Structures are given as C-alpha cells and as structure tokens.
Image (spheres, rainbow, N blue to C red):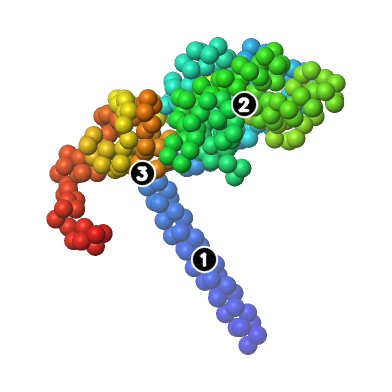
Amino acid sequence: MENKKVVIALQIAVLAVGIAAIVACIVGIRALKIAEKRPVSLDQIALRSNDIEFTEDITFADERVPLEMFNIRERYERELLSTCYFHSNTMLLVKRSKRWFPVIEPILKKYGVPDDFKYLCVAESTLTNAVSPAGAVGFWQFMEPTGKEFGLEINKEVDMRYNVELETEAACRYFLKSYEIYHNWTLVAASFNAGTRRLNKFLREQKVHSYYDLLMADETERYIFRILAFKTILSNPEKYGIYVSKSLEYQPFKYKTIVIDKSVESWADFALEHNITYKLLKIFNPWLRSQSLKVKKGVVYEIKIPVKPFNLTTDYCNEATGGDIMNFENDTILEYLN
C-alpha cells in the first residue's frame, strides 16, 4: 500500500513538472511575439553605462581649467556623468539649443562676451522661460530688482525678463560690469550665481584669486562645472551617446515684426486680426503679461507675429487634412459662454 502511495506521489510530481514546463514554454513564446512587435529592439532596451573619458584641455571662455587638481577633476567629472546619463533632459537640451543658440550667440558677440556664456544660460534655465521659487525669471533668471537695474521693463503688463533677446542683452551688461571688477571670465560667471558682494567676501576672507581655489556654497561650487559639462556634451552630443535626428531638432522661430505705438485693448482681438491665436501670440511674445497694454506716448513695442510653419492653427490643420472645422458661431457653446 505504501509503495502504491509513493508511486502515485511521484506521478503527481512528474505531472506537475510537466504542466509547469508547458506553461513556461507558452509564456516564453508569447513574450517573444510581444518583443517582436516592440517599436525598438531588445538590444536598444538594454542600457549600458560606461565611464567617460575626457581631454585635459578643458577651458571656459579660453581660461584653462586646472584638471590636474584632483578635486577639480572629480567635480567636473561629477557634472559630466550626471548630465550625460540624464538622457531625456540632455536630449531636450540638444533640441532646444538648435532653436535658441542662434538667437543668443549674435548678442553675446555684439557685446564682446565670450561665446561660452551661452552654456551659462543652459545651466540657469535649460533654455526655457523658467520661474524659480525665489522669483528669478527667464532664460537668464533675473530677479526683478536686478532686471530693472540692467535696463529691463518690468510691471503688471510687461515683463521683459521673458523677452529672450532683451534679457540676453541685460545679462551681457551684467557680465561686462562684473569683468571690470575681476578681469577673469570664470569669476564673472561665478558672480552671476553668487553675486559680486558674496564672491568678493569669499575672495577676501580666503585670500585667493581663483574660482578653483575657493570654498563656497555647494550650488556655486558646482556652477562652473555644470556649465563646462553642458559645453562638453552640447558641443559634440554624438560622442556621448546623444543622437537627435536633424528632422526632429527644434528649428528657430520664424516671424515678422510689427511695431506698435498705441494702446491695445485686447490681445485676443489683436491676434485674430493677424490670423493667429491668442496662445500663439503669447508663445512668441511671452513678455506680454496682461490681456491688454497701455502704451505711453513716445514708447514703442515690437510684437512678433509667427509665419509658416509656426502660425498654424487647429482650424487650418483640420481644413488642410479634410477634417471638420469647429465653428463657434454656430455652436451652442457660445450661448453657454455668454
């Protein structure tokens, strides 16, 4: 009897193993079929992280970075690794740089500010009209008092910190004023983060004259190295595994400029008069901070009006593709809104 029980138990075990094997095969086959339908290959899904080799001739604004100092090398490497392996953010920076560097570079050149300062702009805002918790605004992150000090109009209706061109010019004026103090572009860049008063205090107390010898707050200590990391990768993204299709780069905006010297009661009406939407008007002129604008006598403003392909609206796209056009004039939603 006991032998019979043992035989039955073995048969059940063998059957269980057989069923498990069959289930595993089915699951495996199904997984392979799903994998075949993926938009990317399995090799592409597998990520491999490699250490990054870099040259010894790193510079900022033609000023040499002393990488033979162990702490300088490690601080630079930290930012380089962090930036390189933050793939989604770095890829977006590559795309944005194609749109905004052509705007920023000529202004830097006009003022005689080294081209490398465009990477400081990347470090400040990732090339967006960002707003910090402290209230710093725009691509260059000016606080309101500093913005006004360097010539930017800021009020309830207009905030030129959101105007990339004008804020870049204000940043250049800051850099040149700071250079008169330090005669060193690396310290100029550091002062943009820490402020000249605090930076002067550090230099005086620690009795050194180089940014790379200063002990400061972590943010300022990382600041130049973040800029250097952006310069290294954005100058040659493919070398660091960042590939962006030419067709998917963000192209510079195309627009025409209209000069206004009279008040505007409604920017929404103004936009419709120029065959664009209120939203497009604000995208191209983010410095307009109200739905209207009172223009003082003798003052003029330049308004950007997008042109093809940047002026497309939903109605235009629907009409071009044969879709239905939403006509609010014949829609009950108008009655509801009114």
Label 1 CA crowd tier, 10 Å (few <14, some 14–19, many 20+): few
Kindly identify which numbered label has been placed on residue 291: 3
Kindly identify which numbered label has been placed on residue 20: 1
* Disc number lying in front (1 or 3): 3
Q: Are marks 1 and 2 in contact (CB under 8 Å)?
A: no
Query: Where does the image place residue 264, in percent across and percent down from the top left?
Result: 31, 37
**Residue 34 visible in the shown view:** yes
Tell whether 163 sits left or right of 214.
left
CA gap, disc 3 to disc 2? 37 Å
- In this orientation, which residue lies closer to the viewer: 18 or 195? 195
CA gap, disc 1 to disc 2? 56 Å
* Disc number lying in front (1 or 2): 2
Residue at left offset 23%, top offset 34%: 274
Indicate the quadrant containing the C terminus: top left, top right, bottom left or bottom right: bottom left
Kindly identify which numbered label has been placed on residue 102: none
Look at label 3 and name its amino acid. Answer: Gln
CA gap, disc 1 to disc 3? 68 Å
The residue pinned by badge 2 equals: 227
Quarter-of-image position of residue 74: top right
Marks counted in the figure total 3
Mark 3 residue element: loop
